[in-house]
Image: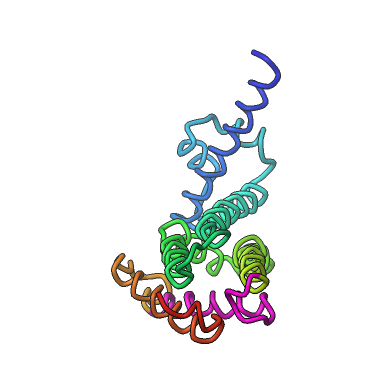
Amino acid sequence: MTRAKAARGRIDKRRAILDAAFTVFARRGYNQACVQEIADEAEVAKPTVYNHLDDKETLFRHAVEATADAVAARCVEAIGGLRDPGADLPAALTDSAHRLLRVCASDHSRALRSLTYAQLTTFPDLADTVQDRTSRHLAEALSDRFARLMLSGRLRATDPARAAEHFLALLTGPLEAHSRLGTRNVPAAELRELAESAVDTFVRAYATAENTER
């Protein structure tokens, strides 16, 4: 086996362990989860888990961080269409908003939020870690997209970071209410309605006159 293949195999095994760890921690909570159950979930030997991550706390932190990074990547991918939104800006914004809501309403995202909230007493810094890797990372990417749209005259010239903050608030606030703080699955049609409502408000506030109509 070449060094490259060995390195790739180690990375893949570490990823499998972290995925399994998050699944077990989300299901059991930090205190009730055990490394043996995580090893069984990952289909590796218990010593293999310790070869990759030193202890349970390190395993927990890395599992949460890896999941947060995966969710953030999906969120940034969801707004990819705003790089070249075409002639119909409201339609492009609605598509991105709908994609974002689908990511935020996914089982993975809901589990990440629930686990973060549940472990704040044990890990008080966890909320900042998750927020930095998800919502703040997304806000920066969205701010960049909006800045480009402002430079091209598609959106009003204003603070793009504030515009991104408002756009996300228009999505996440109603989603929290409709999902009952993440305890209810929101149907696809309902997510679409939330996206359309958010974009309607955002466009009225930020789009230039020629970009407010479909």
Most foreground residue, 77 or 20: 77
Residue 134 locus on image (x, y percent)? 60, 62
Query: Residue 8: horizontal and vertical position, in percent?
Result: 63, 27
At horizontal 44% and vertical 55% (from top left) the residue drawn is: 27
Answer yes or no: is residue 55 visible.
yes
Q: Nearer the viewer, residue 116 or 206?
A: 206
In depth, the one of 76 and 204 nearer the eye is 204
Q: Quadrant of residue 176?
A: bottom left
Q: Quadrant of the C terminus?
A: bottom left
**Per the image, is 156 magenta?**
yes
**Relative to 60, residue 113 above or below:** below
Determine whether, in the image, residue 126 is placed left or right of residue 33: right
Q: How many marks?
A: 0
> What type of secondary structure mainly makes up the magenta span?
helix
Is residue 170 on the magenta stretch? yes
Q: Residue at x 67, y 80 (%)?
A: 157
User: From the image, which quarter does the N terminus lie in?
Assistant: top right
Left or right placement of residue 139 versus residue 74 in this view? right
Q: At which x and y percent is residue 80? A: 54, 57
Extent of the magenta region: 152-177
Query: In this rendering, does residue 127 appear at all?
Result: no
Above or below: residue 201 compared with residue 84: below
- Which of the 4 image quarters holds residue 191? bottom left
Instruction: Work out whether residue 214 or residue 159 is closer to the camera in this orientation and state it.
Output: 214
The residue positioned 46% from the left and 66% from the top of the image is 92
Residue 76, image x, y percentages: 57, 58
Where 45 falls versus 107 (above or below)? above
